[in-house]
């Protein structure tokens, strides 16, 4: 790797204009491919004029009423409820790859017993606003509500305390400063009060280690930033059926397919990728090899095998192509997608780590194949012929 980087540096110094032109072509190719995928997928989505962004709210019992708000969120009002033990069982069974695709999880439970219930203004509600953290391998406070939740008194619990299930609590606004630092009983378990919320009227405690006996949970909401993927929706729905059977009511919502639109566009992407990469490499890398015939001939005369010579030069191209794709992806997702949303409404919704990974593999794969073919044509000549052509 160190020798490869050194070769690239020398090439950039000796053939600066060609090096810059090569990078510009590779950057442009990667950018166009990413944008083409987004535009193609956006076209698939806008074909459905009724498509709406929706959170998934799972209710319990029998459906009493159904409503859809202006944002397309579907609400099913049911006559049943469950307890915190069953909610924990549900969340524990959902695959972590699915949880990381969910922006937030929200549900409200009710206290069955607590010395806090003596306050006439308090209705005994506990709000759980969660998001899954891969770094902590646990549920942490939902960042938006966590960062924007002002306290009237005391301090908010840390993310680490929350993830580890430390028995700390933030009491709602109807409690006064005298409660800070005190221990309160919540469903038979003791919690140290670390703060008093400025405006929220519900208790907040860490999800991990929260009492299983908390009851009265009528629904749980799985929120997404944009459109929920079909795989995520199906996984949550199946897990609800596994845990609750028919007691959990999962509404139908619009989702983004992880399979059909993507694989239908793979052929189009592959053709575009092949053409762009072929033009770039045929015009530029051929010139690069011609200018380095002497170096290649000297390598071979000094005992460098054909296999090693091919590896040296192809490694340079692959490394430059990888860096080019990385830079293009950074620029595209950091700046371009915001501008493109005016024309491609769902362009933010169609990308996933899986999609970008496959596009990168295709990009590097075609680059590898073409550069390998060109190197083979060069290495089929004798070192003496290569040296004469320098």
Image (cartoon, helix red, strand yellow):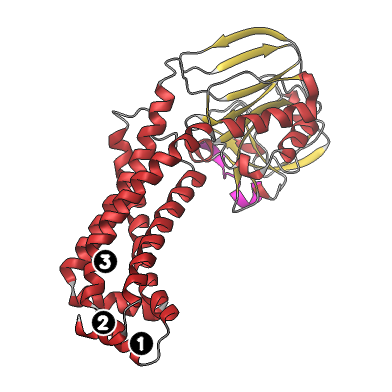
Task: Tell me the magenta residue range.
Answer: 148-162
Q: From the viewer's perspective, tell me whether residue 173 is left or right of residue 184.
A: left
Q: Quadrant of residue 193?
A: top right
Disc 1 vs disc 2: Cβ atoms closer than 8 Å? yes
Q: Which numbered mark, 2 or 3, is in the foreground of this view?
A: 2
Q: Nearer the viewer, residue 39 or 363?
A: 363
Q: Residues within 10 Å of mark 3 (few under 14, many from 20)?
A: many
Count the numbered circles shown. Answer: 3
Q: Position of residue 257 (x, y in %)?
A: 53, 31
Where is mark 1, residue-wise?
300
Q: Position of residue 65 (x, y in %)?
A: 65, 6
Residue drawn at (26%, 51%) of the image: 28
Q: Position of residue 147 (x, y in %)?
A: 49, 41
Q: Nearer the viewer, residue 35 or 286?
A: 286
Where is mark 2, residue-wise?
386
Query: Is 100 inside the magenta-drawn segment?
Result: no
Task: Measure how far apart labels 2 and 3 are at the Cα level.
Answer: 16 Å
* SS at mark 3 in the image: helix
Q: From the viewer's perspective, tell me whether residue 166 is left or right of residue 149.
A: right
Query: Is 161 inside the magenta-drawn segment?
Result: yes
Where is mark 3, residue-wise?
285
Q: From the viewer's perspective, tell me whether residue 247 is left or right of residue 366.
A: right
Disc 2 vs disc 3: Cβ atoms closer than 8 Å? no
Q: Residues within 10 Å of mark 2 (few under 14, many from 20)?
A: many
Task: Measure how far apart labels 1 and 2 are at the Cα level.
Answer: 10 Å
Above-or-below relation of 125 to 289: above
* SS at mark 1 in the image: helix
Task: Measure how far apart labels 3 and 1 are at the Cα level.
Answer: 20 Å
Residue drawn at (16%, 67%) of the image: 17
Disc 3 or 1, which lies upstream in sequence? 3
Disc 2 or 3, which lies upstream in sequence? 3
Disc 1 or 2, which lies upstream in sequence? 1
């Amino acid at each position: 790797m160190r020798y490869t980087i050194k070769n690239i540096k020398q090439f950039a110094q000796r053939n600066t204009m060609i090096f810059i032109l090569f990078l510009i072509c590779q950057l442009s190719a990667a950018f166009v491919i990413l944008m083409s995928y987004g535009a193609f997928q956006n076209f698939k989505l806008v074909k459905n004029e009724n498509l709406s962004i929706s959170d998934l709210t799972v209710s319990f019992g029998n459906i009493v009423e159904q409503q859809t708000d202006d944002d397309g969120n579907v609400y099913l009002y049911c006559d049943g409820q469950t307890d915190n033990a069953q909610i924990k069982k549900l969340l524990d069974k959902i695959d972590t790859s699915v949880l990381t695709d969910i922006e937030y999880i929200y549900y409200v439970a009710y206290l069955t017993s607590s010395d806090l219930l003596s306050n006439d203004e308090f209705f005994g509600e506990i709000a759980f606003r969660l998001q899954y953290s891969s770094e902590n391998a646990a549920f942490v406070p939902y960042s938006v509500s966590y960062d924007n939740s002002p306290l009237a008194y005391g301090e908010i619990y840390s993310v680490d305390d929350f993830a580890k299930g430390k028995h700390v609590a933030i009491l709602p606004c109807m409690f006064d400063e005298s409660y800070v630092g005190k221990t309160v009983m919540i469903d038979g378990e003791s919690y140290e009060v670390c703060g008093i919320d400025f405006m929220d009227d519900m208790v907040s405690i860490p999800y991990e280690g929260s009492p299983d006996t908390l009851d009265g949970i009528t629904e749980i909401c799985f929120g997404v930033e944009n459109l929920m993927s079909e795989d995520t929706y199906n996984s949550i729905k199946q897990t609800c059926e596994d845990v609750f059977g028919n007691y959990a009511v999962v509404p139908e919502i619009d989702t983004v397919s992880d399979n059909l639109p993507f694989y239908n566009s793979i052929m189009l992407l592959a053709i575009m990728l092949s053409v762009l990469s072929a033009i770039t490499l045929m015009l530029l890398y051929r010139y690069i090899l011609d200018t380095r015939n002497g170096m290649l001939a000297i390598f071979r005369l000094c005992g460098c095998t054909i296999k090693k010579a091919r590896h040296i030069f192809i490694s340079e191209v692959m490394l430059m192509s990888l860096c080019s794709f990385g830079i293009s992806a950074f620029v595209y997702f950091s700046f371009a997608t915001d501008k493109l949303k005016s024309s491609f409404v769902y362009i933010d919704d169609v990308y996933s780590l899986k999609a970008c990974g496959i596009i990168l593999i295709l990009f590097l794969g075609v680059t590898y194949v073409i550069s390998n073919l060109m190197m083979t044509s060069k290495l089929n000549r004798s070192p003496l012929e290569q040296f004469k052509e320098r």
